[in-house]
Amino acid sequence: MENCEEKKTLGKEIMIGRTRFSSNVLMAPLAGYTCFPFRLMVKRLGAGSAYTEMVSADALKYNDRATSRLLFTDEREELKCVQLLGAIPAVFERAAKSERLAKFDVIDINMGCPVPNVVKSGEGCALMDDIGRASAIIEAVKRSGKTVSVKCRLGMNRKKIVIEEFARMCEGSGADMITIHGRTRDMMYDGEPLYEYIKLAKQAVSIPVFANGGIDSGEKALLTMEKTGADGIMLARYGFENPLIFPQLSGTKCSDTKYSLISEQLDIAGECYDELFVLTYIKKLASYFMKKLPGTKQKKQELFKCGSITQLKPLLWDIFGS
Ligand SMILES: Cc1cc2nc3c(=O)[nH]c(=O)nc-3n(C[C@H](O)[C@H](O)[C@H](O)COP(=O)(O)O)c2cc1C
């Protein structure tokens, strides 16, 4: 697949509430991965938006280092999108209106996280089982005046697929967009998404609906658009593994290679974070970049032994540069 020029379904700009997304191919929030340098990179490559990983709405009241790092951004990131996790409408409202989020244009509400501790606290995907509370949260965030999106799944399990009703509730409560991960909570991150339910939800509302889950090639991106009738797609794990999919899908001109991308990431991350964080991030990125490269077991071992950026640089050249 060369690009999406012929079908014109992907790479189109789209209005989400009053916010313009330059393309309808988006990058998902990924905890531990979608830090500021990564978001800058995918936006430059043609992603219409890229979200911070989930940030606890409640934790915003503390000035802790971990939350500050998650929220780090600067003027280079033109469209700033943050994702919040929580269960209490008043906590969301305080967070959404807080000075710490003043610079963010879009707030996404996590209603899809399947992790047991999160669900037990009534957060993430548990909100799909508590539609009144989910609605109150959307209304509370909306009172900040910002653009509000919701990221959810199909429901808790295959016997409890509620996405049509849930999508209607999101629209009625004021959400400007919904991203639907086409799996149920009990599917976690495996198995083929049930795209037909995304289609039903799309038909039930008039706000933009984005399809997410299992998109791991250009062909799959187009197929997902066809199967769901969605307004756009959100890439997650594959977007991290191969950011060059963004120019391919969005039609953005680019002469980057995996080596140029990772070198740039090393430089930007080096400006923003301490060495330990940079090492951890670049190692994760490099091992995802190597995922489908054959015979890289030894290189991966060398990568994980690297104890400094000085050691890392020649290894990255060895793996991706030559
Ligand atoms: C390691 C990891 C971290 C994730 N973190 C988040 C998160 O912070 N917020 C969120 O809404 N979804 C999160 N997700 C879910 C993804 O955004 C996405 O919905 C899911 O991976 C399905 O898309 P995919 O099959 O294309 O990867 C995470 C998924 C993974 C694998």
Image (cartoon, rainbow, N blue to C red):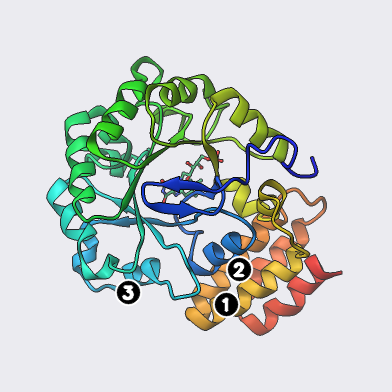
Residue 291's place in the image compared with 175, above or below, is below
Residue 264, by quadrant, is bottom right
- How many angstroms separate mark 1 from mark 2 (CA)? 11 Å
Instruction: Tell whether circle 1 marks a residue whose Cβ is less than 8 angstroms from ligand 1.
Output: no
Q: Earlier in the sequence, mark 2 or mark 3?
A: 3
Q: Nearer the viewer, residue 93 or 293?
A: 93
The residue that appears at 38% across and 35% down in the rendered structure is 207
- How many angstroms separate mark 2 from mark 3 (CA)? 20 Å
Image coords of residue 246 (percent x, y):
65, 52
Mark 3 sits on what residue? 65
Classify mark 1: residues with Cα within 10 Å, few (<14), some (14-19) or many (20+): some
Disc assigned to residue 282: 2
Image coords of residue 230 (percent x, y):
52, 31
Residue 258, by quadrant, is bottom right
Q: Nearer the viewer, residue 70 or 275?
A: 70
Q: Seen in the image, is 133 located left or right of residue 38? A: left
- How many angstroms separate mark 3 from mark 1 (CA)? 19 Å
The residue that appears at 37% across and 67% down in the rendered structure is 71
Image coords of residue 206 (percent x, y):
39, 30
* Amino acid type, callout 1: Ile
Disc assigned to residue 268: 1
Instruction: Tell whether circle 2 marks a residue whose Cβ is less than 8 angstroms from ligand 1.
Output: no
Q: Cβ–Cβ below 8 Å for labels 2 and 3? A: no
Q: Seen in the image, is 69 located left or right of residue 40? A: left
Image coords of residue 107 (percent x, y):
33, 53
* Farthest-out residue, top: 159
* Farthest-out residue, left: 90
Look at the numbered disc 1 and give the secondary structure of its residue: helix
| Quadrant of the frame with the N terminus | top right
The residue that appears at 70% across and 51% down in the rendered structure is 251
* Amino acid type, callout 3: Arg
